[in-house]
Image (cartoon, rainbow, N blue to C red):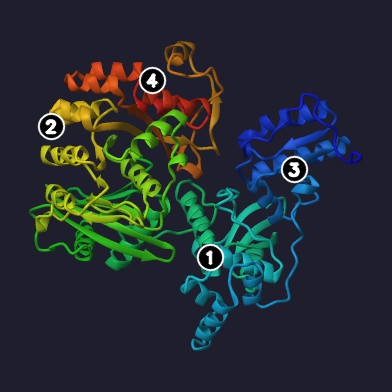
């Protein structure tokens, strides 16, 4: 028998759906949804599409639902996303956002148990491990059980936070992971104060402020925010890592807008009263918070300029006085094991830096210039996990071609593109996919950017005479099945790579070319015989990184008709299209984070025959396109059609075809 309280079914069978992002720019979309539901006299509303929400978007959602309720229109959200359920749970909006009974969460109840018992009940811990941790904690009067469990690796941060939430009867949330952190929120406290208390304000509705705390037993943490804001504060529990990441995002937003959301007075970079160690740490932590990949410290005539590369673009972050700049450069050289007395030649070094949840390696290079030594630090995040191949962004055909190539028993698979286009990340994803106890995988890299379990990794050391050629010749006597080469940059490395591929090894490598077909002609130009390139090459993938448009501030616009006609043949669809505007979330640039776009050439017999005849780059590209290769521009336009980037960004990264 049908449920008499259920809303009517939509006549077309297709449910109205909420926008993917609930924020101020989506009000018109929400209004259309409410009109559609009212026209159907109620029904189910698809909430599975919501992947990000802020306070303004949540208010629009609740206003719409309340308006329908006042008109006696019955609506129920079906399959609400984790993001939407997190906001509902954190602000205690169960009565305001109705969901189906099968989507409803069990009520939060306080468990009258100790932490260890809760962890066992949740299957996060076994009794023997608990006894071991309790015995260890008993010998350390100042150590909490949770701290001991984390140190021993018996539980992770998320499991501990979930157990604490259950123990004290608090909701468990992940504001950053579920994208319901509103970086425009005001807490009237400095970020440093919020860090001290371990509290993250993340959503607000009317006079209710949702905060995440790392320790639910610390009632003072939420009370500090309540007294500062005068709002009713409702607390949930999040992991310490989640809170730190959220506070980093708040601090990033503060530094990229005129009026501070949370009052923060950052110290000037060039304050001579600040010790050089503290100045270095502040510079690096701020760069990590901004998501920078490189830090440039550049000497000019009277001062030093500090710039950071974020999402592929350099941006100035401050200046340092001449004396302070020299001291900072010397400090970096000392930490990187460089010779501080030598300023006439370039030097390379490495620094390992840890600060709280941050754990990075810095690849340091110094270069003499007219006004002094310029220092560049490449940031390599040691905590960043692997990215599976199927989430890199490859479409079905490109992914199939790449997987076919990397599962050949021998031959050569190349990844090409400019510096900073994500080639090494792709190769690490390939290694993660093919690694197995049954095969011997060896790499030669400069430097080793991430450790891969089950892979023997060697780092080039030019000072010791250990270059790519020397490493590769030795590796061939190490009985390898797969060899990964960080970069083919000279004739010797190219010839050894081809020789290895000919003698029964699978060779993975990167190469600097503009497109996938150009890899074959580049190897021939390096001195490798065309017939050898044809015999060994299996797959070539070119890639670029395009910036994703910021979901918080993107605006629809109409592409000129002549531009639409020009790129229609490459896959550009009529719309809707969006343009970048800029807001504190995206540092006022209109883009946030990046996405890979790809071009994969499968070397089939027809392409092999052409390569053996030493073709021009144009001839080889035409043949590859004829055999089904999708060009970079076509892959980039996929994201324009999805509303995830702009046409200008796609053309910048992938070319104008």
Visible residue check, residue 187: no
Judging by the rendered image, the residue that carries numbered circle 1 is 157
Disc 2 packing (10 Å; few <14; some 14–19; many ≥20): some
94 and 582: which is toward the camera:
94
Give the CA distance from mark 1 to mark 3: 33 Å
Q: Is residue 276 above or below residue 369?
A: below
107 and 192: which is toward the camera:
107
Give the CA distance from mark 1 to mark 2: 50 Å
Q: Earlier in the sequence, mark 4 or mark 2?
A: 2
Q: Is residue 582 left or right of residue 406?
A: right
Q: Secondary structure at mark 4?
A: loop
Give the CA distance from mark 4 to mark 2: 27 Å
Q: Quadrant of the N terminus?
A: top right
For the residues labelled 4 and 3, say whether their Cβ atoms are less than 8 Å apart: no
Rendered image quadrant of residue 651 = top left
Give the CA distance from mark 1 to mark 4: 47 Å
Q: Earlier in the sequence, mark 2 or mark 3?
A: 3
Residue 19 drawn at (x, y percent): 64, 35
Judging by the rendered image, the residue that carries numbered circle 3 is 62
Disc 3 packing (10 Å; few <14; some 14–19; many ≥20): some
Give the CA distance from mark 2 to mark 3: 64 Å
Q: Earlier in the sequence, mark 1 or mark 2?
A: 1
Q: Earlier in the sequence, mark 4 or mark 3?
A: 3
Q: Secondary structure at mark 2?
A: loop
**Residue in view at x 25 percent, y 41 percent:** 507
Q: Secondary structure at mark 3?
A: helix
Q: Is residue 602 left or right of residue 261?
A: left
Judging by the rendered image, the residue that carries numbered circle 4 is 628
Disc 4 packing (10 Å; few <14; some 14–19; many ≥20): few
């Amino acid at each position: 028998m049908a449920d008499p309280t259920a809303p009517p079914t939509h006549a077309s069978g297709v449910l109205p759906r909420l926008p993917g992002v609930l924020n101020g720019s989506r009000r018109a979309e929400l209004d259309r949804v409410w009109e559609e539901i009212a026209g159907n006299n109620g029904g189910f509303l698809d909430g599975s599409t919501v992947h990000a929400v802020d306070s303004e978007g949540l208010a629009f959602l609740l206003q719409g639902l309340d308006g329908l309720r006042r008109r006696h229109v019955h609506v129920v959200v079906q399959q609400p996303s984790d993001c939407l359920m997190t906001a509902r749970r954190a602000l205690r909006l169960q009565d305001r956002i109705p969901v189906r009974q099968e989507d409803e969460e069990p009520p939060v109840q306080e468990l009258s148990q100790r932490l260890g018992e809760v962890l066992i009940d949740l299957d996060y811990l076994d009794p023997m491990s608990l006894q071991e941790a309790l015995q260890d904690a008993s010998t350390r009067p100042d150590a909490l059980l949770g701290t001991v469990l984390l140190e021993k690796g018996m539980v992770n941060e998320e499991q501990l936070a979930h157990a604490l939430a259950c123990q004290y009867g608090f909701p468990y949330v992940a504001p950053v992971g579920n994208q319901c952190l509103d970086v425009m929120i005001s807490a009237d406290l400095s970020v440093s104060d919020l860090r001290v208390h371990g509290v993250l304000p993340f959503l607000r509705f009317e006079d209710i402020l949702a905060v995440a705390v790392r320790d639910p037993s610390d009632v003072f943490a939420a009370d500090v925010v309540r007294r500062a804001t005068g709002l009713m504060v409702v607390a949930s529990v999040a992991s310490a890592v989640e809170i730190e990441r959220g506070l980093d995002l708040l601090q990033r937003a503060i530094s990229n807008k005129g009026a501070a959301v949370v009052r923060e007075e950052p110290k000037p970079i060039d304050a001579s009263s600040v010790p050089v160690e503290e100045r270095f740490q502040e510079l690096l932590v701020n760069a990590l918070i901004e998501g920078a990949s490189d830090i440039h410290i550049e000497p000019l005539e009277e001062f030093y300029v500090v710039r950071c590369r974020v999402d592929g673009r350099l941006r100035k972050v401050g200046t340092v006085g001449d004396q302070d700049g020299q001291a900072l450069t010397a400090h970096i050289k000392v930490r990187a094991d460089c010779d501080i007395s030598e300023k006439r030649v370039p030097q390379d070094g490495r620094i390992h830096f840890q600060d709280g949840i941050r754990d990075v390696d810095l690849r340091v290079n110094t270069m003499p210039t007219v006004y002094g030594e310029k220092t560049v630090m490449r940031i390599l995040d040691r905590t960043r996990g692997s990215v599976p191949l199927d989430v890199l962004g490859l479409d079905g055909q490109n992914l199939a071609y790449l997987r076919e190539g990397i599962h050949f028993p021998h031959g050569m698979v190349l990844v090409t593109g400019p510096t900073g286009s994500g080639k090494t990340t792709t190769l690490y994803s390939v290694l993660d996919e093919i690694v197995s106890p049954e095969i011997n995988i060896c790499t030669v890299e400069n430097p080793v950017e991430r450790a891969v379990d089950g892979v023997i990794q060697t780092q080039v050391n030019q000072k010791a005479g250990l270059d790519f050629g020397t490493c590769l010749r030795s590796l061939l006597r190490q009985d390898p099945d797969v060899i990964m080469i960080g970069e083919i940059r000279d004739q010797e490395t190219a010839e050894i790579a081809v020789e290895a591929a000919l003698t029964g090894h699978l060779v993975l490598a990167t190469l600097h070319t503009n497109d996938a077909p150009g890899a074959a002609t580049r190897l021939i130009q390096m001195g490798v015989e065309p017939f050898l390139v044809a015999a060994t090459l299996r797959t070539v993938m070119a890639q670029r990184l395009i910036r994703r448009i910021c979901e918080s501030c993107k605006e629809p616009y109409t592409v000129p008709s002549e531009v639409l006609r020009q790129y229609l043949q490459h896959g550009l669809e009529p719309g809707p299209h969006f343009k970048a505007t800029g807001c504190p979330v995206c540092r006022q640039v209109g883009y946030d984070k990046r996405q890979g776009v790809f071009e994969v050439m499968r070397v089939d017999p027809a392409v092999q025959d052409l390569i053996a005849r030493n073709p021009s780059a144009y001839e080889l590209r035409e043949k590859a396109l004829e055999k089904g290769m999708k060009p970079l521009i076509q892959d980039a336009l996929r994201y324009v059609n999805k509303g995830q980037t702009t046409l200008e960004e796609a053309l910048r990264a992938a070319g104008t075809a």
